[in-house]
Image (cartoon, grey):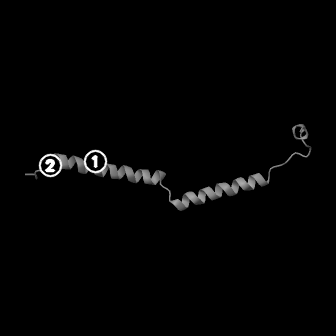
Amino acid sequence: MSDVINLRRERKRRKSVEDAKLADANRRLHGRTKGQKLAETLEKQRIQALLDGRKLSSGAPSDESENP
């Protein structure tokens, strides 16, 4: 014969296992450390500054800047 089990506890245990698997999958998909987030932000800022520094400016002044 099999052992007698409490169905409520078994349901909770199964839900806990399922939730743990889902949490692990979410950590793999979305989880990044604080250092990784900071490094990505700094890299974006560096690239933006590099692009801003290489923008071409027009040689002729525009009419809008001459009006007081």
Which three-letter amino acid code belongs to the residue tagged 1? Lys
Number of callouts? 2
Q: Is residue 62 above or below residue 45?
A: above
Residue 42 location in percent, x, y?
A: 63, 58
Residue designated by label 1: 15
Residue at the image point whose x is 47% and y is 51% from the top: 29
Give yes or no for contact between labels 2 and 1 (Cβ–Cβ under 8 Å).
no
Residue 16 location in percent, x, y?
A: 29, 51
Quadrant housing the C terminus? top right
Residue at the image point whose x is 25% and y is 49% from the top: 14
Q: Nearer the viewer, residue 30 or 68?
A: 68
Residue at the image point whose x is 65% and y is 54% from the top: 44
Q: Is residue 40 above or below residue 65?
A: below
Residue designated by label 2: 6
Looking at the image, residue 34 sits to the left or right of residue 7; the answer is right
Residue farthest toward the front in the current orientation of the protein: 68
Residue farthest toward the left in the current orientation of the protein: 1
Q: Secondary structure at mark 2?
A: loop
Which three-letter amino acid code belongs to the residue tagged 2? Asn
Image quadrant in which you'd find residue 63: top right
> How many angstroms separate mark 2 from mark 1 (CA)?
14 Å
